[in-house]
Image: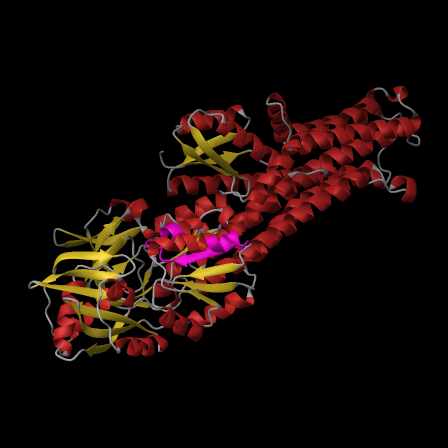
């Protein structure tokens, strides 16, 4: 499958438009999945279909489309949206000004009666027709395209409402004697004001909607346009697009790093908050990795470019955020089903309302029937319904990215909000992930150097985190160790190999007993080490115990605070580790973890997650995304804890760009806030229509004499979508 294709979609106005575009894209051969985002006015398509075929399908459905390939296309999209924003204001001012003049003239009695001056009223009819054609023509073109495609959308409702108002009023002017005297009322002002108010609402919505994508704009703006590259001994400023792999780049104080790379000369402090969310600059020296978009705060250094273009960490982050913002949670797909039948239902209600008023309404029944049908069509705006979910997703995912939390899709966002249990790995998640050898107890007949040399020889071929601590201790003491022969790692137990004809094994007590090694009274000492938070490891040679080693990996400074935050969110926290049970319990007690499942083999972690799920728990697994990949995939939500370079961890639903459990608390709190915001938006949109449509149809008239004006209906409809967007924007500043 090729990379996803992103399209900019023009002409979408409501949830019905989203459904139409999605269906059109899904009918293109080769399309596996198509997701349309009303808030961003984009579509993301995966599969083997080419962009030209997708664009043709969208245009056939009555909309316009263009492929978004890079930053230039994104900038062009923003420019077009700015032009559209200005055009909407122009429409609102022209239609609003003309409509207001008509309304005031009629209200003050400045206009003659229709029978007295039909020429004047015909002039108003032509003015109204001109406004509907020049200012509101896009409503009618959109409605016609929808009709041809056999569906309806917001354009259909506005076109029917304003068009019927103009047509009825013109018939009154041309043939006044054909209607009862009480029904001889023109609604030219209503038709024009409706166009102005809908345009004003769209302009306000467009302005507010632009703020929802500020996270993406901020990320894109982090990459500098140029960089100082050293070629053939000369320093030259080049566009970032022209930088190649292995290029030498000079980074001066105050400059942003243009691409991912590695420092080979100099040192500095780099602000990586855009990646990790951590405000403190990180010390960087020769051999350290640096990432595109981060800020060099102090010294100058030279770096080699290791990743450029779309392969940089920043590019990965931008792509992940875009994909997540364009995705739909389950609740959003439910809205799509409602939106698919919304417009036909509204038109049906309008027709029924007209018939009821015409047959049983008071005189002039035709005028009342006309007003009620027009008001129902105008007030029933599906815009708010279509915006309710995507706008909140865009803001929530964007804010998460600014906090160093990458949420892969809307489904993960919804699932994270429903979690009850958090399962965490120990090493590198709860603890610092930098184990150190803190205890070395050789048996009689061996000294510390001999024991450490044997242990280091075994661990030379190991990639286990504990191996690094033994090798580091050997280096600090100046002990050289050559790798053993026949090295073999036994997952969950330890390692073994041969050295100078002697068989060495290093591992936990289970491994030693499996190999018939007599541990003697060292087990009691190992229990003491475990109780203090150290991991006991045994070293044996030819079946004889050589030494007991204690390796300590202390909890992170913020782990206790993060666990407390998770508890305040009502979550149960469980540690799942392959480490010794006493050691794991000691670490858990320090940070306040509720339960411990210890001495679990890597391949058995998935089973433990399944057991918890079988008890009805919604489980998140927090791990490093590599050793814990199967468990991350099995959990309801997989959360990978990593660094800024680990942004493409495939097994996780959520990736944290800093090694801190606070990121887990941030992700869950933000997920809950976002889902709560979506429900608020949907409740508002549904209640607006549930209450508004019956009132517009006139259900209150028999009891209170209230019949809603089409102008008030247009104002209410216009503000409904603005209210939804404004509510979503609260997520940007909401306290978690």
Give how far across and how far down residue 388 sits, in percent: 61, 46
In the image, residue 284 sits, relative to residue 113, either above or below, namely: below
Residue range corresponding to the magenta coloring: 611-631
Examine the rendering and report whether any part of residue 503 can be seen. Answer: yes
Tell whether position 612 is magenta.
Answer: yes
Q: Nearer the viewer, residue 336 or 395?
A: 336
Residue 316's place in the image compared with 73, above or below, is below
Rendering coords of residue 59 (x, y %):
51, 26
Q: Is 49 displayed left or right of 667 in the figure?
A: left
Location of residue 68 by image quarter: top left
Instruction: Looking at the picture, tell me which residue is in the foreground, 590 or 565.
Output: 590
In front: 541, or 141? Answer: 541
| Residue 230 picture quarter | bottom left
Q: Quadrant of residue 369?
A: top right
Q: Can I make out residue 715 in this image?
A: no
**Does residue 633 lie above or below 141 as drawn?**
below
Q: Quadrant of the C terminus?
A: bottom right
Compared across the picture, whether 121 is left or right of 557 comes to: right
Q: Nearer the viewer, residue 535 or 25?
A: 535
Q: How is the image coloured?
A: secondary structure
Q: Where in the figure is residue 662, as x and y percent of width and height?
A: 45, 65
Inspect the magenta stretch and tell me whether residue 317 lies in it.
no
Q: Is residue 585 left or right of residue 569?
A: left
Asked if 488 appears above or below 437 in the picture, the reply is: above
């Amino acid at each position: 499958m090729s990379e996803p294709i992103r399209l900019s979609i023009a002409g979408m106005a409501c949830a019905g438009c989203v459904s139409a575009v999605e269906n059109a894209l899904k009918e293109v051969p080769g399309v596996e999945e198509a997701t349309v985002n009303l808030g961003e006015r984009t579509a993301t398509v995966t599969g083997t279909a080419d962009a030209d075929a997708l664009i043709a399908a969208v245009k056939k459905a009555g909309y316009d489309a263009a492929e978004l390939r890079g930053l230039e296309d994104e900038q062009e999209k923003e420019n077009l949206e700015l032009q559209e924003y200005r055009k909407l204001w122009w429409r609102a001012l022209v239609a609003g000004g003309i409509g207001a003049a008509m309304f005031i003239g009629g209200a003050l009695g400045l206009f003659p009666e229709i029978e007295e001056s039909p020429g004047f009223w015909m002039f108003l009819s032509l003015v109204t027709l001109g406004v509907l054609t020049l200012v509101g023509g896009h409503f009618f073109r959109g409605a016609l395209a929808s009709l041809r495609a056999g569906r309806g959308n917001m354009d259909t409702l506005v076109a029917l409402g304003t068009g019927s108002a103009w047509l009825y009023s013109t018939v009154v002017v041309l043939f006044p004697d054909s209607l009862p005297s009480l029904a001889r009322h023109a609604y030219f002002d209503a038709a024009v004001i409706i166009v102005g108010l809908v345009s004003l609402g769209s302009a306000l919505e467009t302005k507010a909607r632009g703020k929802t994508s500020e996270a993406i704009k901020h990320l894109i703006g982090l990459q500098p346009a140029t960089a100082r590259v050293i070629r053939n001994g000369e320093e030259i400023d080049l566009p970032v697009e022209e930088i190649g792999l292995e290029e030498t780049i000079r980074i001066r104080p105050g400059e942003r790093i243009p691409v991912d790379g590695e420092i080979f000369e100099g040192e500095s402090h780099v602000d990586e908050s855009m990646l990790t969310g951590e405000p403190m600059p990180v010390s960087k020296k020769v051999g350290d990795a640096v990432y595109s978009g981060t800020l060099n705060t102090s010294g100058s250094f030279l770096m080699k470019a290791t990743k450029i273009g779309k392969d940089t960490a920043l590019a990965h982050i931008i792509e992940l955020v875009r994909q997540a913002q364009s995705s739909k949670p389950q609740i959003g797909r439910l809205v799509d089903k409602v939106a698919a039948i919304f417009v036909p239902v509204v038109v049906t209600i309008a027709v029924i309302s007209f018939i009821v008023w015409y047959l049983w309404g008071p005189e002039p029944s035709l005028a009342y029937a006309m007003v009620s049908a027009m008001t129902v069509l105008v007030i029933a705006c599906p815009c708010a319904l279509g915006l309710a979910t995507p706008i909140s997703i865009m803001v929530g995912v964007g804010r998460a990215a600014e906090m160093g939390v990458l949420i892969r899709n809307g489904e993960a966002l919804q699932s994270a909000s429903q979690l009850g249990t958090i399962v965490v790995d120990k090493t590198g998640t709860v603890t610092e992930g930098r184990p150190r050898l803190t205890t070395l107890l050789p048996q009689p007949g061996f000294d510390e150097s001999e024991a450490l040399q044997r242990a280091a020889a075994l661990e030379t071929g190991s990639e286990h985190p504990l191996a690094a601590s033994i090798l580091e201790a050997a280096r600090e003491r100046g002990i050289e160790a050559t790798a053993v022969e026949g090295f073999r790692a036994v997952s969950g137990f330890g390692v073994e190999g041969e050295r100078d004809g002697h068989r060495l094994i290093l591992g936990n007590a289970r491994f030693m007993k499996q190999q018939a090694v007599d541990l003697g009274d060292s087990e009691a000492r190992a229990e003491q080490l475990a109780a203090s938070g150290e991991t006991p490891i045994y070293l044996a040679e030819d079946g004889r115990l050589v030494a007991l080693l204690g390796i300590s990996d202390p909890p992170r400074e913020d782990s206790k605070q993060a666990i407390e935050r998770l508890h305040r969110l009502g979550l149960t926290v469980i540690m799942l580790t392959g480490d010794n049970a006493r050691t794991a319990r000691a670490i858990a007690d320090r940070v306040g973890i509720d339960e411990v499942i210890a001495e679990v083999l890597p391949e058995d972690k998935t089973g433990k997650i399944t057991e918890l799920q079988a008890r009805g728990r919604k489980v998140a697994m927090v791990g490093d995304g590599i050793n814990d990949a199967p468990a991350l995939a099995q959990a309801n939500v997989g959360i990978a804890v990593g660094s800024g370079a680990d942004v493409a961890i495939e097994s996780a639903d959520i990736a944290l760009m800093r090694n801190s459990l606070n990121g887990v608390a941030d992700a869950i709190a933000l997920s809950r806030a976002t889902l709560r915001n979506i429900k608020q938006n949907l409740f508002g949109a549904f209640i607006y229509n549930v209450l508004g449509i019956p009132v517009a149809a006139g259900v209150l008239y028999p009891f209170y004499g209230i019949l809603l004006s089409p102008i008030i209906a247009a104002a209410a409809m216009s503000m409904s979508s603005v209210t939804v967007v404004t509510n979503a924007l609260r997520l940007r500043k909401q306290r978690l």
